[in-house]
Image: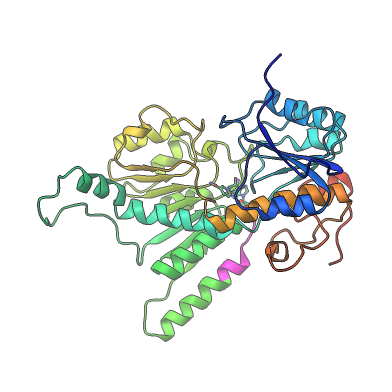
Amino acid sequence: MAKPLQVEVYNPNGKYRVVSTKPMPGTRWINLLIEQDCRLEICTQKKTILSVEDIISLIGDKCDGVIGQLTEDWGEKLFSALSRAGGKAFSNMAVGYNNVDVNAANKYGVAVGNTPGVLTETTAELAASLSLSAARRIVEADEFMRAGLYDGWLPHLFVGNLLKGQTVGVIGAGRIGSAYARMMVEGFKMNLIYYDLYQSTRLEKFVTAYGQFLKANGEQPVTWKRASTMDEVLREADVISLHPVLDKTTYHLVNKERLAMMKKEAILINCSRGPVIDEVALVEHLKANPMFRVGLDVFEDEPYMKPGLGEMKNAIVVPHIASASKWTREGMATLAALNVLGKIKGYPIWSDPNRVEPFLNENAPPPAACPSIVNSKALGLPVSKL
Ligand SMILES: NC(=O)c1ccc[n+]([C@@H]2O[C@H](COP(=O)([O-])OP(=O)(O)OC[C@H]3O[C@@H](n4cnc5c(N)ncnc54)[C@H](O)[C@@H]3O)[C@@H](O)[C@H]2O)c1
């Protein structure tokens, strides 16, 4: 028989058994669970990605809820195991849930939580950091300096792109895409072109008002445009950032043909999910177009990169850290724990998953509600009146 995975147990005599497949930042989420009579078991096994079998062993014979991670495959096998153990609650510690088969969860009556609202600014800030780093070739210049190659100022040394007055393109102007657009428009006075299935009226209003403000101060006003196709954004923008959800419609959204539409010196940023870009086609494009640059937080076959990507000087690659600020990661842990706790306690669903501040206030008890359950309608769960 396989050796049981290592776990750390809190409040061993708690009435409800909750499992977290990973240790998560902060302690508030732990305290919130144990104060509400949960026995909490945190898997501390030194293994980055747990297999389905590992998680089935953690669930065991009796389990009321699980907090899991986006690297885990939450489908039929896990939801049936959780249901057999009496569990009705699962939460991803992530806003995206493309690792979760929600239909399978519905079949077993398991609520699926996610953690929106708390990642928005942090993720947008990383996309902005990658945009700047790519535009000004920060990583290449840093490597050059550390290698002792700098022997004096030169007019051509690491010349990059000025962002002011250029056009930023956003594909998927939801929460994160809109926050990123605002940063680039307001911070660097870039014009905006965006493509989304829905109109982002708030974003349009913001850019209009900011443009008027600049004009009133004698500066060139910024402009915005909602593109009718994604290709329009690719052709016109100087910096393009991808922020859609990953689903059937966005898989390989950026492929060989679409890369060819982009400007030769364009910058492409991806902080959404790896498979939104055809990474093999991207490597070929980077090789053929040395002035084209990318900033990638996510990869098609995470944790791996497609062959050749790691050697490309015109690619900046970071290991899926877009949500990695202390505030955000602790907030994600709190929201995930409260999703599971709320379902166990029979609480209703919070009416607006984007307005999660009341759950994050450390000086007050959280509302008696589940912050965000993505299949609440399918399961017919009641909505909070708070
Ligand atoms: N790298 C990270 O660590 C990290 C962190 C947070 C979120 N994410 C990813 O970012 C995604 C977006 O998060 P969000 O909170 O902004 O979600 P959101 O739902 O607010 O925004 C997604 C937007 O994409 C749009 N969209 C969907 N299909 C599209 C298509 N085919 N073409 C254009 N637009 C399309 C939607 O209309 C929506 O406006 C998440 O689903 C997640 O996968 C990654």
Q: Is residue 327 left or right of residue 233?
A: right
Nearer-the-camera pick, 313 or 215: 313
Residue segment shown in magenta: 196-204
Q: Is residue 52 left or right of residue 85?
A: left
Residue at 43% in and 71% down? 222
Rendering coords of residue 340 (x, y %)? 78, 47
Residue at 22% in and 46% down? 146
Residue at 70% in and 68% down? 363
Seen in the picture, residue 74 relative to 147 is either above or below; the reply is above
Q: How many marks?
A: 0
Seen in the picture, residue 76 relative to 100 is either above or below; the reply is above
**Visible residue check, residue 227:** no
Q: Is residue 287 left or right of residue 87?
A: left
Determine the image quadrant of residue 149: top left
Residue at 50% in and 55% down? 170
- Residue 202, magenta (yes or no): yes
**Visible residue check, residue 321:** yes
Determine the image quadrant of residue 177: bottom right
